[in-house]
């Protein structure tokens, strides 16, 4: 499937086309286009889609008799659509050709990861032996965040005549890429206008309904040999719109007749310029889009600059791992850099859990930045900072949510989109039973701890105290305030408790037979809340006097409140049972599940919750988790950090107890999330556990092998992809960048014995780390900065001077 810098599918298989489209998506950090075949509009096999970062629209739907609202990442007009048919001199016109035509003899797809170029080859031969070879090349331009282009070449074999080509700009698209959302309103674009300008330019403008963002697309079509186009907007009576699946007045068609023969090929280049009302500086969108596409260079020049931009990205984001694991990691990194590139740093967007690759999760922002920001902070700190600013700009919405819940401070939503309000659905469909069920996942309050953790770790990694003392401080302190206000004192336990939440597990939304949702004292939630409170106090202690006084005045912080923060951070309750950390209070009292019986009956039981609900049962009754919950603590904190955190809370956690906790919960996890195998692999790698690689491998193959059973075609799992890269760079290496320099403590996996990567540490850019069996090298590029401190296992402290490489034995 992959070799070197290539990701290839060597034949066309309709049943896997959605997967190919997602994994061959191209993007530049501002927008992305799925790797769909240009010949087809959306149908049961194909789903073209173009998505602009941060472009959401809110629509109302009637679901199970209930009016619900959802805010979705909008599928933009399809600029790639290109239809063609053969017009032989010695016969009647042929049918419009697609990969699904009976004349298709071969089709392959090739993704160049080094240069960000997608290539499709198709070869058709009809019953008379006439052949047509078609090649498509596509880029979403990394040199300028507003451009994309597609090159198509036609070559005839055994006949002469012409190819009739229709270059379509299709605005009659909907959000229909996820089967279980089909009951929801998917029409998000309205007020379409379209037309033509000189120079082969077709244009389309439209807007979303709410909040009403305006969009302008201009497409320049150039053919060789050059031929005049027959131009028509849909609804003009040409019939073209109906054939191509577009609606009246919602798109344009430019039709060409291009002569071809055995020694005479023809080419078509479509170049896109995309403008929106969110762009800065604001201007007349249509005029700007037409000007952009008119000035855009030819395809060859675009590709040259595009590849050069990708080369710079790979130099800054380098990760080299030999073998198959390295190939997959490179693909993961490619999709991370396409979703969140340096262009993203100029936008007001968060981390979309499914990338810009599809419509699953409606394009919402969850907690996946927890798995994405560590890599970005080490390689592209400006992008990481911008993503944290997305959270800070939505601090007023988080404060409003806390007040509405009767609390204080800031309570971030489980699902976020444009406004920062809670976008989690209130109902969800179980495809197994066909029933719509209440959705209580919005009770995952731990997302606030993830935001605070990211703020703190970003500042520790980059040394960006300016951010930490400004926007970062305000964000973290308001989250700490919310936790202190949420915790209630239980005199019987002599402890503070946090009730009525849902943990990362997501399966357990309530106690068995309970009338109200939520569980009490989720260990992950409580321990991370204690950590946030402690860091809030640390941060106040390090702020310059003037800034501390300013924040205390603005936030109305007084000594009494800070004293409560300290008390809660030391006395939050953490449940244990049978000598291990419980997932939540009462978890150990739940029934045990007959795992082997369910595996024998259903095979794949990743979505055990859906299986049990379809049987009339509920996962709330069982000690069964969707994904790592309590064990997430082992992902966030090194063992000694975690043990110290428990000690601050007044609990003894040692290596033996933690190993028992890991083993206990691992046996009771169905891995219904792609993040689950990642976290378990990370935790077991730190313990050098025997099964570490099995879980790491599951995380690596989660998307490329579509282990979740059809979900990858709806959008890649960005957190898991970024997390696998981070697993190598930080997990196996034991790397942590902080004020004392670069700390490394490798815990090697035999399956990845050697690797290398570059990173940014405390202002040093391009620091290269190489890990070999028993040895480690650190190279610091030449610069005016001083030496880089390195802390080796056993607290051995050394320095590496700028312009020097040093090797160390481990």
Image (cartoon, rainbow, N blue to C red):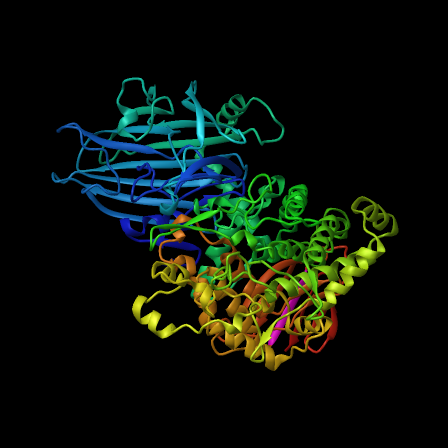
Q: For residue 397, what is the image quadrant? A: top right
Residue 558 place in picture, x, y as percent: 84, 53
Q: Can residue 323 be seen in this view?
A: no
User: Which residue is at the front of the view, 412 or 362?
Assistant: 412
Q: Quadrant of the C terminus?
A: bottom right
Instruction: Look at the picture and state if 198 lies above or below 511.
Output: above
Q: Nearer the viewer, residue 264 or 43?
A: 43
The stretch in magenta equals 775-780
Instruction: Name the image quarter holding residue 651.
Output: bottom right
| Image spot of residue 620 (x, y percent) | 46, 64
Q: Residue at x 48, y 47 (%)?
A: 426
Q: Taking 269 as reference, is 530 left or right? A: right
Residue 100 percent coordinates (x, y):
24, 43
* Rendered position, 458 above or below 35: below
- Compared across the picture, whether 732 is left or right of 542 comes to left
- Relative to 586, 459 lies left or right: right
């Amino acid at each position: 499937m992959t070799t070197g810098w290539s990701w290839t599918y060597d034949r066309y298989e309709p049943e896997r086309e959605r997967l190919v489209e997602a994994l061959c998506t191209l993007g530049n950090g501002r927008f992305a286009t799925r790797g769909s075949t240009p010949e087809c509009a959306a149908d049961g096999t194909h789903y073209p889609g173009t998505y602009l970062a941060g472009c959401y629209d809110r629509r109302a739907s009637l679901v199970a008799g209930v009016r619900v609202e959802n805010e979705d990442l909008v599928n933009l007009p399809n600029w790639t659509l290109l239809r063609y048919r053969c017009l032989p001199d010695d016969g009647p016109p042929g049918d419009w050709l697609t990969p699904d035509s009976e004349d298709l003899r071969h089709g392959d797809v090739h993704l160049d990861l080094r240069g960000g170029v997608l290539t499709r080859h198709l070869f058709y031969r009809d019953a008379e032996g006439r052949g047509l070879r078609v090649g498509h090349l596509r880029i979403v331009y990394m040199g300028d965040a507003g451009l994309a282009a597609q090159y198509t070449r036609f070559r005839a074999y055994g006949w002469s005549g012409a190819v009739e080509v229709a270059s379509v700009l299709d605005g009659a698209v909907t959000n229909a890429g996820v089967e279980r959302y089909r009951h929801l309103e998917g029409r998000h674009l309205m007020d379409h206008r379209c037309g033509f300008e000189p120079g082969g330019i077709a244009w389309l403008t439209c807007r979303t309904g709410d909040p009403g963002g305006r969009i302008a697309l201009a497409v320049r079509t150039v053919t060789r040999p050059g031929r005049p186009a027959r131009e028509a907007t849909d609804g003009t009576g040409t019939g073209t719109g109906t054939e191509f699946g577009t609606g009246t007045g919602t798109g344009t068609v430019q039709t060409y007749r291009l002569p071809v023969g055995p020694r005479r090929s023809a080419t078509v280049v479509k170049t896109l310029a995309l403008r929106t009302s969110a762009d800065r500086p604001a201007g007349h969108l249509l005029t700007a889009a037409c000007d952009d596409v008119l000035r855009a260079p030819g395809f060859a020049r675009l590709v040259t600059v595009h590849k050069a931009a990708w080369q710079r990205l790979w130099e800054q984001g380098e990760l080299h791992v030999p073998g198959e694991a390295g190939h997959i990691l490179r693909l993961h990194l490619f999709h991370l850099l396409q979703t969140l590139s340096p262009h993203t740093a100029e936008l007001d967007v968060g981390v979309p859990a499914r990338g810009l690759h599809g419509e699953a999760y409606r394009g919402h922002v969850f907690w996946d930045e927890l798995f994405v920001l560590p890599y970005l902070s080490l390689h592209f700190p400006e992008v990481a900072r911008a993503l944290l600013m997305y959270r800070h700009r939505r601090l007023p919405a988080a404060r409003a949510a806390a007040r509405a819940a009767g609390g204080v401070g800031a309570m971030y939503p489980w699902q976020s989109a444009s406004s920062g309000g809670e976008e989690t659905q209130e109902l969800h469909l179980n495809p197994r039973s066909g029933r719509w069920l209440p959705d209580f996942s919005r009770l995952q309050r731990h997302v606030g701890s993830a935001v605070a953790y990211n703020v703190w770790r970003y500042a520790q990694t980059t040394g960006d105290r300016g951010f930490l003392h400004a926007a970062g401080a305000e964000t973290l302190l308001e989250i700490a305030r919310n936790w202190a206000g949420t915790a209630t004192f239980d005199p019987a336990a002599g402890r503070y408790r946090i009730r009525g939440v849902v943990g990362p597990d997501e399966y357990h939304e309530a106690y068995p037979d309970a009338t109200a949702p939520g569980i009490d004292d989720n260990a992950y939630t409580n321990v991370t809340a204690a950590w946030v409170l402690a860091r809030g106090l640390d941060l106040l202690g390090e702020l310059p006097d003037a800034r501390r006084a300013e924040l205390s005045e603005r936030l109305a912080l007084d000594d009494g409140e800070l004293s409560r923060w300290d008390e809660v951070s030391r006395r939050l309750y953490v449940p244990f049972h049978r000598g291990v950390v419980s997932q939540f209070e009462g978890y150990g009292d739940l029934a045990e599940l007959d795992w082997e019986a369910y595996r024998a009956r259903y095979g794949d039981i990743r979505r055990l919750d859906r299986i049990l609900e379809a049987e009339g049962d509920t996962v709330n009754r069982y000690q069964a988790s969707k994904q790592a919950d309590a064990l997430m603590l082992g992902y966030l904190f090194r063992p000694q950090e975690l043990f110290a955190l428990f000690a601050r809370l007044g609990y003894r956690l040692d290596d033996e107890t933690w190993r028992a906790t890991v083993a206990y919960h691992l046996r009771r996890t169905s891995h219904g999330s792609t993040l689950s195998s990642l976290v378990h692999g990370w935790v077991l790698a730190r313990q050098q556990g025997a099964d570490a690689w099995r879980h790491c491998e599951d995380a690596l193959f989660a998307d490329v092998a579509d282990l979740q059973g059809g979900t990858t075609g709806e959008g890649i799992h960005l957190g898991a992809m970024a997390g696998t890269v981070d697993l190598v760079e930080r997990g196996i290496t034991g790397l942590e960048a902080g004020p004392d320099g670069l700390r490394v403590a490798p815990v090697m996996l035999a399956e990845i014995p050697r690797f290398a990567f570059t990173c940014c540490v405390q202002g040093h850019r391009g620091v290269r780390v190489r890990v070999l069996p028993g040895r480690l090298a650190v190279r610091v590029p030449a610069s005016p900065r001083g030496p880089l401190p390195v802390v080796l296992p056993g607290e051995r402290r050394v320095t590496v001077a700028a312009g020097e490489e040093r090797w160390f034995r481990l």
